[in-house]
Each structure stands twice: as structure tokens, then as C-alpha cells.
Image (cartoon, rainbow, N blue to C red):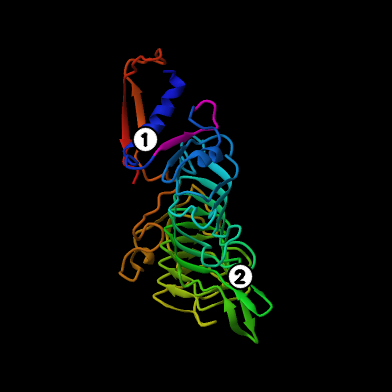
Amino acid sequence: MKATNLQTLLFSLLFLAAFAVQATQITVSSDPNRVAQYTNVQSAIDDATDGDTLLIYGSPSSYGDIVINQKSLVLIGEGYNSNLSLITSFGTVGIGRFDSNNSANGTTLLGLRISNLSINANWSGSDNSTRTLQNIDVLRCEITDINIAPGSFIVHTISDLNFINCLINDDIELGRAFGVSGSTTYVDFLDDITFSNCVFSSVDINSRLRRDAGVLSAFIDLSGVRIFNSVFVDGVNNGFLDQTVNLVLEDNIFFGHELYGGDYAQITWNNNLFYLTDQTPLGSNDNVGSGNILNTDPQFTDYPATPTGFSYDHDYTLQAGSPALTASVNGEEIGIYGGAYPFEVGAQPPVPQIIEVTIQDGTSSVPQGGTINFNFKAKSGN
């Protein structure tokens, strides 16, 4: 075995215990120094079967655009801030449905950097009853733009979609398919969509609504969309929320934000902390909530006094005495280190990880069929 193939072996061993009960594991690498079964991710997706796991090496270049719409897959990268400076990165990742029987339901993405994540239940020849997508998990990924149910004048049903420990850098569009054509109203149904323990940097969230004589007449109901235990830094000038109705925000920290854009209504704000924000969360457009802390410094361990975008140099842990340490409804910590999924900045996927390898006899290569002896240390990857 050549020495350059040792990394391939270790990368496969890395996930063996965590995914022993999964179906086939497929390795992908576009780096010529890291040999794998495939060099192209879309080709691996096309050849995979339902339930397979793709282990995708970090690479000096992007893997481009991919679409998953015919099977449930697990895609695992090396994290969006790898110690080796080799990132598993993509352009547009499309998660969708191919026809009435085949879809990406049950797909999981871990440890990827994605420019645009598009989650779309539409397919050619579909009708409202079959335009559905569910059970999608996105863990420890960095994402620039998120589009949930994009399209034009169609109905989507998206449910059980979870973002956990993600870094989100720009726009989130929720149900942009909403529109009005003549007397017919087209609406998206978004249910049980959660963003948990995420960092939002310069992010705005928008949807669609319509008012007649100042009264809401049609809108996408976002009461099934919940953002909790997250941190929002460096707000955008046109407002964090734009054309949003019934969104639920709990146990979050906002540092430097204009909260509202062009239109909004009936937002639920519970147990959030606000500092250097231009507007108060309640008191207008039928917003509701309780337990919020206004105009109060959260006392991050290391963050500039003037609001700025996310940096790996920042430390969002809370100093002793921070009011955010006891601000949740149960008197516990709010922000990214509270709740069920404490955040780890730039974390690799939550699977076992090899952190040290020692070749016992100093051998750099062995003949085919030979033996190489090594010791390794690993951590759980929780």
C-alpha cells in the first residue's frame, strides 16, 4: 500500500463504527493526492442506492452543483473549517423530489460548505398532493443562501426539516413560491422546520404576504418554523425579517440588528436578548412573546464592541455574570451554547474522528499485500 493511500484507509475507518448499520459507504475525492472510489459527487449520487453514505474528502476546489431527488442519502464532508484547509464545498445543492415515488426524503448533510441550498418539492407532472418533502437534516454545515420551497405559483409541503449547528451567512427564503394569480391564491405549507444552535451572520429572512386595505389577506404561515438557541450578528440594513408572518424565535441572542424590513406580522418572540438593535420586538403588528431582555450586552467572551460579521476569531461563549446565562424559560442559558445541541465553531461532522496517527516502524510504503503497523487516537466526535 502506498503512503498516499493511508489517508484513504483512515478516512474510511473514521466512519466505520458510526455507520456500521448503514448501507454501502462510498468514498469521493477530487484531490489526486487522496484516492477514492469516485472523483465526481454527482456520479456517486447517481450510482448510489437508497440509504447509502457518501464520504466526501475535502478538496482545494469545489465539487460544483449536485442534485439529490431520487433516494435518501447521507453526505458527510470534512467540515467547513478543516484543520487541513481542505473543505468539502459545493455550489448549489438541490434537495427535492423526482416523481411521486422517488425523492430525497430522509437525506442528511453533514460537514459541508454550500453556496446555495435549495429544498424544492416540485417535480414535472406533479400536483398538490404529491409535491411534498420531509425528514431532511442539515448538521454542522456552512451555508450562504437557503431557499425552502422556491418556485412560482405552486404549492409545496415541506416538513421535518432540521438545521443544527450551522453557520448561515446571507439570505433565507421561506416559501417564495407564494403568489396570487387572478382570484386563486397559492400557498406553501412549512411544518416542523427548525434552526437550532446556529450562527446567523448578516442574515435576512423573507417570505411572501399580501394585504388588502392594510389587512392580511394571504400569506405563508410560518408558525411551523422555529429558530432557537442561536446567535445573530451584524444585521442587514433592510431588516432581518421581511414579509414574514407567525415565525417563532426563542432563546436567541441578537447583537446589532434592524429587526424588521418591509412587512411582517404576528411574530412570536420568547426569551431572546437584544443589544444594539434599532427596533423593539413587540408592540406592533400583533407581535407576541415574553421573557425578552432589551438593550443589554450579552457579554460574549470575545466579540467587537461594534457589530460585525462572523469570524473564527470570535468567541460567543458567555462571561460569568452575563444575563443570557439564565435567560431561558427554564432559567438556563440562551444562545448557541444552551439547549440540546451546544455549538462548536467550524466543527467536523459529529462522528468519530482520528486525531493522531503514528506509523510504528517509520515505513512510508509497503508492497501490495504487505503489512503496515500503526497506532491511532480518536475522539467521539459528539
Looking at numbered disc 2 in the image, what kind of residue is underneath it? Phe
Say which of marks 1 and 2 sits in front: 2
Does 27 appear in magenta? yes
Q: Nearer the viewer, residue 110 or 66?
A: 66
Q: How many marks?
A: 2
Under circle 2, the secondary element is loop
Rate crowding at label 1 as few (under 14), some (14 to 19) or many (20 or more) other CA atoms within 10 Å: some
Q: Position of residue 240 (x, y in %)?
A: 57, 67
Name the quarter where the N terminus is drawn.
top left
Quarter assignment of residue 66: top right
Quarter assignment of residue 186: bottom right
Q: Position of residue 261 (x, y in %)?
A: 61, 71
Whether residue 252 is situated above or below residue 286 in the rendered picture: above
Q: Nearer the viewer, residue 366 or 241?
A: 366
By secondary structure, the bulk of the magenta-drawn segment is best described as loop
Q: What residue would you read off at disc 1? A: 14
- Any mark on residue 178, and which? 2
Looking at numbered disc 1 in the image, what kind of residue is underneath it? Leu
